Image (spheres, grey):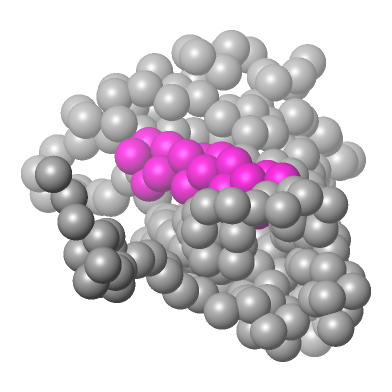
Amino acid sequence: MALIHRRLIGLSAFVAVIGVGLIVAAFATDHWINSSPVSVNNGTTNVNATGGSLTGHTANITFGLFTGLKKIDFGLGIRESNLMIKCDQGACIYAGSGKDEIETPEEQLASILRQYKNQSNLDDKTMAHYGLFSFPLYVVVLVMLVLAIVWGLVAIGFAIFNVFGRPIETITGPTGLYLWNILACIFALTAIGCYLGLYFTQLKVNILRLKDQDPFSSKDHTNLDMSFYFVVGAVGAFLFNQFILCFSGQKCSCDYHRSGEKEVDSGMILY
């Protein structure tokens, strides 16, 4: 029976490795967002029955937490541009870098921030209209993902320790295994929630800079991509570990004995 318990705990370590690996993959890949902006002329979307452009103008944008790639065709051939996140004054943007970019990424951000802050009161356009998104939410997503990785690694370490060693403290034993996995799950879920907030309030509304908004629009043509779902898979892995630990017979408890509860031999006399 003890052998089965050890094997199940070893399985939980393997599942935790998968969870951590998925989050690392989410960090490393540039597919959190996939957008296929469409050509718009006088407020009318120019798309055919198959979703293609009637004007020959096409665009595709993918990006992750740090970098991305933009392919855009204004009717003169596809132009590729690497994207990178630049942040300042509480706002971030995916700035372009390449031979077709006149301004540096820093200059692009500064220019767009000036336009956003100098707009008239009558315009009252949001950050998303300028291709900007919230810096605080972006940072929270990164921090939560890092913490999820940290607790995932702790879960792996203590699971291995429980397989090959003899834990003598509650926190290094079964209770700890439950705790580390649930903490990793909570932080990953928080990252998902914050990114969904960023997506629905800003990224889904617009991810294009002003110079690309003529003639393109990305509204309702931007979707979450596979890198985001890697984190969802990691949450599933950490939750699955709870079931593995329960199935292994490991109990989440904090047993202790107070010295006052110990029986005292009536024949013992203390001087």
Q: Is residue 42 above or below residue 206?
A: below
Number of disc labels: 0
Q: Could you tell me if residue 90 is visible in this image? A: yes
Give percent across and percent down for residue 38: 66, 63
Range of residues picked out in magenta? 135-157
Magenta stretch mostly in which secondary structure? helix
Of all residues, the one furthest to the left in this rendering is 121
Residue closer to the observer: 181 or 264: 264
Q: Is residue 107 magenta?
A: no
User: Residue 254 appears in which quarter of the rendering?
Assistant: bottom left
Give percent across and percent down for residue 245: 68, 77
Give percent across and percent down for residue 158: 68, 50
Q: Is residue 148 above or below residue 14?
A: above
Q: Could you tell me if residue 214 is visible in this image? A: no
219 to the left or right of 96: left
Residue visible at 20% across and 36% down?
Answer: 119
Residue closer to the observer: 60 or 56: 60
Residue visible at 82% across and 35% down?
Answer: 79
Q: Is residue 32 above or below residue 1?
A: above
Give percent across and percent down for residue 230: 73, 61
221 to the left or right of 244: left
Residue visible at 17% across and 50% down?
Answer: 270
Q: Quadrant of the N terminus?
A: bottom right
Residue visible at 78% across and 68% down?
Answer: 9
Q: Is residue 54 above or below residue 165?
A: below
Residue closer to the observer: 19 or 45: 19
Q: Is residue 156 magenta?
A: yes
Q: Quadrant of the C terminus?
A: top left
User: Residue 116 appears in which quarter of the rendering?
Assistant: top left
